Image (cartoon, helix red, strand yellow):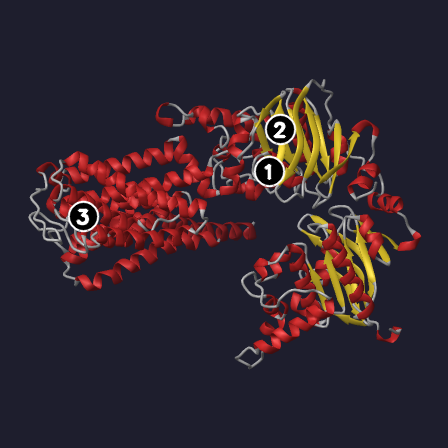
């Protein structure tokens, strides 16, 4: 392959803002077809945002994009496709039509956009082209199979096949390996390498897993806080340096950690395995008054773990003990009876009723306490309790009958926590509680968690925000690929060390 | 100063129109009922008489009872289409107890309603365990039990003195007590009691609150420890129970079991329950709203009959009113 055939894509001085956040500022990024680029950075560094600009999802950016020296304007995903830029997003299902077959999905663009005046679809041609494309990828999937029957890995390959059919010059893979098994990852890498060397495709590989980046990429770009902080050839950098670059300066935020005397064993989890065998935990303990951090990057399996112990997903095996007594969380309602409380990650979807009042939300978990004869709810008592929580957590609301929809994200999060304060649970599981919460509310949430610890509760705090975990926890389990890979004392560890283990270092 | 003043005027007119539109979405249905009553009483001298008001209340009683059941299925974000068939089935069962088996009033009613609860069991199984969408699951049970009711009666109707299809003569009589249920004041009293109990249950008890929470956000309900499946099943059991009760009242009113007698109650009941969403700006299914919805449908029907609108054209108007009510409920949601 000589250089004359290579196309060059150049993003120059790209900035983009979202209400209240400057997501990217003056970013330069350059790529050439036929090469594989790694794009790494901590959560919120701006990797996905940058790639969404290339994919035509965000169009209100400032800056210029050039293709082979000519300025181009990407105004929609369709523009991007016509220029030969294809993005495979993390959520593969959103890009596929489940009840159509493999060939139809691969050829979707042809069928939708290239029909012009033709009214009939040439199925033979469609299947023929789809089959040949899969052959060049070395993938063996029947083109008549319905996409809904495929595994996640196969779905990804279908999207990649779709990309090559369209003569893609640049293929962007956003966290493609997060849901895959090791053999599936090997297969994906073989195909990606083949694409770049034989089909002259330029690949951008976004990942949290540094060993993978080292395995497959030629060049690596590190982003942090919406800026590109380094561009390196892969031979000239090692994992430790990368971790340092990703973190940059030490975070100077102060977290109000309370000093709490840690008591005896409160919660113990042994030989835990979910039905898909993705999450395997051999041993995890939480003591009275202890805040245990579960640190892991997106896709490490934290949410699945939190929900599994709360009884949302069935288990293959696993023993849960509270105060030495074996308990069974067969369903969330059973878990609540056993003294568990879960503050889920997706709070709007899983934590609150946006059309109900603050009171109704706050007493959702404890309504039985207010029920009197014929289960009629004692509304005035309920209101008093709700007011108490509103005051305790300083939830900003005009009154307790305001609809939850009208509160800010931080105050909604406080409601989600607040509803667990009345039933007086024993074990509190927080799953990314600070996601989308401003700094003020964050501090208040930490304050509440500290108070819970003081009351002698056991607390599990799962997050991908390592500085926060360091600030609030007593002990940290690092999760990688569904397993706890390291247990660390918070006092004796650092962000670098956590990130090292969380990205697959050994 | 001048600009500030004009700005505030603009804001005032804006909020004025907003207030008007808010008022209409909130009270539109109640207003419609009022306007209809006013119009009919001005054009029809007999409309607002005591006997006609009783006629209207009596005619909406069955719809109200069945529609209250639909309301329960709607609270959990479900939908029960099988209510019409349940009413038919209960009607056939209860009349057959009297005519075929010569049983007395209360055991017959209890047995008939208990047997129809099989439909609720099947609905819950299909929806909760088999995960079939509510509308489709109840569509299939609707057909199924329309057939079951007809098979039970042997494809015909049941009434006093009529021999069974195989020629066996029947000697049972429909008891006088049973006939009273379908007459005023009892039928109207039953209606009010059902509405009142449903209202208290949905708004003031823990269980009612849980039903709304399951319907409002099922994931949040599950993760808050509410036994979601139990409450969904409960909603379908109440729905079936009230449809069966409607069927029993119907049996008492017409004094016989007719083929598909309950089918005609499906549409007005669904309409009443959906109209109920918008009453007083509740924005969710509720007992009082459903009652207002039933009144709207009943007043409309009564007035149109008195204005000699032919029965075959009535559905045009009824369908139109339903569309109007749905507009009031859904149009606002897009804002």
Q: Residue furthest right?
A: A236
Residue hosting label 1:
A315
Whether tag 1 and tag 2 are in contact, CB under 8 A, the answer is no
Q: Image quadrant for the N terminus of chain A? A: bottom right
Local packing at callout 3 (Cα closer than 10 Å; few below 14, some 14-19, many 20+) is: some
Local packing at callout 2 (Cα closer than 10 Å; few below 14, some 14-19, many 20+) is: some
**Which sits in the foreground, A222 or B224?**
B224
Q: Where residue A318 appears, x then y in whole percent? A: 63, 33
**Which sits in the foreground, A213 or A224?**
A213
Q: Evaluate whether label 2 is on the same chain as label 3.
A: no
Q: Quadrant of residue B235?
A: top left
Q: Which numbered tag is attached to residue A320?
A: 2
For the residues labelled 1 and 3, the Cα–Cα distance comes to 55 Å
For the residues labelled 1 and 2, the Cα–Cα distance comes to 11 Å
**Which sits in the foreground, A117 or A67?**
A117
Q: Where residue A134 appears, x then y in whole percent? A: 69, 68
Q: Where residue A302 appears, x then y in whole percent? A: 67, 40
Residue hosting label 3:
B59
For the residues labelled 2 and 3, the Cα–Cα distance comes to 59 Å
Q: Which numbered tag is attached to residue A250?
A: none
**Circle 2 SS class:** strand
Q: Evaluate whether label 1 is on the same chain as label 3.
A: no
Q: Where residue A208 appears, x then y in whole percent? A: 77, 48
Residue, x 60% and y 28% (percent of image)? Answer: A393
Whether tag 2 and tag 3 are in contact, CB under 8 A, the answer is no
Q: Nearer the viewer, mark 1 or mark 3?
A: 1
In this rendering, does residue B42 appear at all? Answer: yes
Q: Chain of mark 2?
A: A
């Amino acid at each position: 392959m000589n250089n004359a055939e290579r196309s060059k894509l150049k993003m120059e001085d790209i900035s983009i803002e979202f209400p209240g956040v400057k997501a990217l500022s003056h970013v330069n990024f350059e790529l050439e077809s036929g090469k594989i680029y790694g794009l790494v950075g901590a959560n919120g560094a701006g990797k996905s945002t940058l790639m969404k600009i290339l994919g035509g999802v965000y169009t209100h950016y400032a800056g210029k994009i050039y293709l082979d020296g000519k300025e181009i304007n990407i105004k929609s995903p369709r523009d991007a496709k016509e220029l030969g830029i294809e993005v495979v997003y993390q959520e593969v299902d959103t890009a596929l039509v489940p009840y159509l077959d493999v060939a139809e999905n691969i050829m979707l663009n042809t069928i939708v956009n290239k029909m012009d005046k033709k009214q009939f679809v040439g199925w033979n041609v469609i299947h023929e082209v789809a089959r040949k494309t899969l052959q060049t990828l070395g993938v063996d999937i029947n083109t008549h199979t319905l996409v809904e029957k495929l595994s996640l890995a196969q779905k990804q390959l279908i999207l990649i096949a779709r990309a090559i059919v369209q003569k893609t010059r640049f293929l962007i893979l956003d966290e493609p390996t997060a849901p895959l098994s090791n053999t599936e990852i090997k297969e994906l890498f073989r195909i990606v390498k083949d694409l770049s060397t034989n089909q002259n495709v330029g690949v951008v590989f976004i990942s949290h897993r540094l060993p993978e980046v080292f395995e497959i990429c030629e060049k690596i770009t590190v982003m942090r806080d919406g800026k590109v902080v380094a561009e390196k050839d892969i031979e000239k950098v090692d994992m430790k340096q990368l971790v340092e670059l990703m973190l940059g300066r030490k975070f100077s935020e102060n977290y109000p950690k309370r000093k709490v005397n840690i008591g005896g064993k409160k919660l113990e989890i042994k030989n835990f395995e979910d039905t898909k065998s993705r999450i395997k935990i051999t041993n995890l303990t939480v003591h009275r008054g202890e805040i245990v951090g579960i640190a892991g990057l997106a896709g490490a399996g934290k949410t699945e773990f939190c929900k599994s112990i709360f009884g949302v997903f069935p288990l293959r095996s696993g023993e849960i003990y509270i105060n030495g007594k074996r308990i069974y969380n067969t369903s969330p309602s059973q878990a609540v009876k056993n003294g568990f409380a879960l503050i889920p990650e997706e709070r709007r979807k899983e934590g609150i009723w946006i059309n109900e009042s603050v009171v109704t939300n706050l007493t959702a978990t404890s309504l039985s306490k207010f029920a009197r004869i014929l289960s009629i709810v004692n509304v005035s008592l309920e209101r008093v309790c709700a007011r108490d929580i509103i005051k305790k957590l300083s939830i900003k609301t005009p009154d307790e009958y305001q609809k939850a929809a009208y509160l800010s994200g931080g105050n909604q999060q406080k409601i989600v926590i607040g509803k667990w304060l009345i039933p007086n649970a024993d074990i509190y599981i927080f799953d990314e509680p600070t996601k989308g919460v401003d700094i003020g509310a964050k501090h208040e949430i930490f304050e509440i968690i500290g108070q819970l610890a003081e009351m002698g509760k056991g607390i599990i705090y799962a997050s991908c925000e390592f500085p926060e975990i360091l600030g609030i926890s007593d002990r940290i389990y690092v999760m990688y690929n569904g397993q706890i890979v390291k247990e660390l004392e918070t006092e004796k560890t650092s962000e670098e060390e956590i990130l090292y283990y969380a990205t697959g270092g050994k | 100063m001048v600009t500030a003043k004009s700005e505030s005027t603009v804001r005032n007119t804006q909020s004025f129109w907003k207030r008007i539109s808010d008022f209409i979405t909130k009270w539109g249905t109640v207003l419609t009922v009022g306007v209809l009553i006013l119009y009919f009483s001005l054009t029809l001298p007999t409309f607002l008489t005591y006997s006609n008001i009783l006629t209207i209340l009596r005619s909406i009683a069955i719809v109200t009872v069945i529609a209250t059941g639909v309301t329960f299925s709607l609270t959990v974000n479900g939908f029960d289409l099988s209510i019409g068939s349940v009413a038919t089935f209960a009607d056939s069962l209860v009349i057959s107890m009297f005519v075929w088996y010569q049983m007395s009033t209360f055991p017959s009613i209890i047995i008939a309603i208990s047997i129809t609860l099989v439909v609720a069991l099947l609905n819950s199984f299909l929806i909760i365990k088999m995960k079939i969408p509510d509308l489709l699951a109840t569509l299939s049970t609707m057909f199924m039990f329309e057939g079951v009711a007809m098979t039970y009666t042997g494809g015909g109707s049941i009434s006093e003195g009529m021999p069974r299809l195989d020629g066996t003569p029947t000697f049972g009589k429909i008891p006088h007590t049973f006939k009273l249920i379908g007459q005023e004041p009892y039928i109207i009293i039953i209606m009010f009691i059902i509405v009142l109990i449903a209202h208290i249950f949905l708004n003031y008890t823990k269980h009612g609150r849980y039903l709304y929470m399951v319907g409002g956000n099922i994931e949040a309900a599950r993760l808050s420890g509410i036994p979601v499946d139990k409450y969904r099943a409960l909603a379908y059991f109440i729905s079936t129970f009230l449809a069966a009760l409607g069927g029993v009242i119907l049996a008492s009113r017409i004094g016989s079991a007719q083929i598909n007698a309950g089918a005609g109650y499906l549409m007005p009941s669904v309409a009443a329950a959906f109209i109920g969403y918008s009453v007083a700006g509740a924005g969710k299914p509720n007992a009082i709203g459903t009652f207002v919805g039933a009144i709207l449908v009943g007043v409309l029907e009564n007035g149109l009959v008195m204005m000699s609108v032919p029965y075959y054209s009535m559905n045009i108007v009824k369908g139109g009113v339903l569309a109007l009510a749905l507009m009031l409920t859904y149009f606002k949601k897009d804002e």
